[in-house]
Image (spheres, coloured by chain):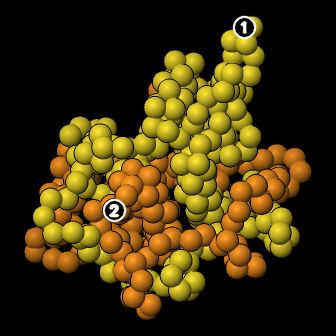
Chain colours: A yellow, B orange
């Protein structure tokens, strides 16, 4: 493998996610989608990304079922891009990234944006808990093991099956 | 900007995180660090990444305070890489990525690995809650706004200050 990581041959759920969204630009495209961006020109304005690169990333996200398209004009035909259920499930990835950037890159005083958790009115701070018991994670409290004996399916195999 | 995203000019906590860990390979290097990998040769074996690329990524992670080095042999001098506190705080990013890959790429039957939450014995499933009220997120329950009026610091400005 060269400078560009090939995630597809690994047998790993993190690599699987990176295979779909780990491309440069893609997580920023999704960040904007969560803020309501739906149209090509809006992304282009916000990201300053080359049009051919943006078109390729949107196409891949649609092919991978993260975004779906809808016509918002018939003449001329114009489409917009909406997050699917699968795409919306990436919100925790973006929110944990935002939390880390706020705390460890921007540091004291926090990042440029605040997310308010409307139901309670607090500034949203992401906390990851175990769905089973509801407790927050502490260092070293997870044990990592193979799910099955025998062949470990690669990312490419999982994507071919989907 | 070209095919490679330049995150540094954005004013955004997600972009800030990507500036530090958004490079291809880097999140896989960190994934392995969370599984106990500390030495150059171990990463090289597991990832199959070119040595110069791996060396550059480790150097950047040390420069950014995500990993720190420690000599484990004096003659010959050999160093290993340990996650700092800042690095350990990336665990939620990797765990939410793993959760998404398990569910949406590997799908039915789950991914190749299981993470057991030792305190309760359940298979760990990541759930993101609001630190303020403890409630799980629901769609559309976050309002996004600027933290301050006036200049929004870019990622590059934040990193220069740190």
Mark 1 Cα-neighbour bin, 10 Å: few <14, some 14–19, many ≥20? few
Q: Determine if residue B144 is in view.
A: yes
Q: Is residue A98 above or below residue A36?
A: below
Q: Is residue A66 above or below residue B110?
A: above
Cα separation between marks 2 and 1: 44 Å
Q: Secondary structure at mark 2?
A: loop
Q: Left or right: where does residue B29 sit relative to residue B20?
A: left
Residue drawn where x is 10% and y is 70% of the image: B76
Which sits in the foreground, B38 or B124?
Answer: B124
Q: Which residue carries the number 2 mark?
A: B109
Query: From this viewpoint, which residue is outermost toward the front?
Result: B108
Residue drawn where x is 17% and y is 63% of the image: B42
Mark 2 Cα-neighbour bin, 10 Å: few <14, some 14–19, many ≥20? few
Q: Which residue carries the number 1 mark?
A: A76
Image quadrant where one finds the C terminus of chain B: bottom right
Residue drawn where x is 73% and y is 12% of the image: A74
Image quadrant where one finds the N terminus of chain B: top right
| Number of the label disc, if any, that sits on residue B11 | none
């Amino acid at each position: 493998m060269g400078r560009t990581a090939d995630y597809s041959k690994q047998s790993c759920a993190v690599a699987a996610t990176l295979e779909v969204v780990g491309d440069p630009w893609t997580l920023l495209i999704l960040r904007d989608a969560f803020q309501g961006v739906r149209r090509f020109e809006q992304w282009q304005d916000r990201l300053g990304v080359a049009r051919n690169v943006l078109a390729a990333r949107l196409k891949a996200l649609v092919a991978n079922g993260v975004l779906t398209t809808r016509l918002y004009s018939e003449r001329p035909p114009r489409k917009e891009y909406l997050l699917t259920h699968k795409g919306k499930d990436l919100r925790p990835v973006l929110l944990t990234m935002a939390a880390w950037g706020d705390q460890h890159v921007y540091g004291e005083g926090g990042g440029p944006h605040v997310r308010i958790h409307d139901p309670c009115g607090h500034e949203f701070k992401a906390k990851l808990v175990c769905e089973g018991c509801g407790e927050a994670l502490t260092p070293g409290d997870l044990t990592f093991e193979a799910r099955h004996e025998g062949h470990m399916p690669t990312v490419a195999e999982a994507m071919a099956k989907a």
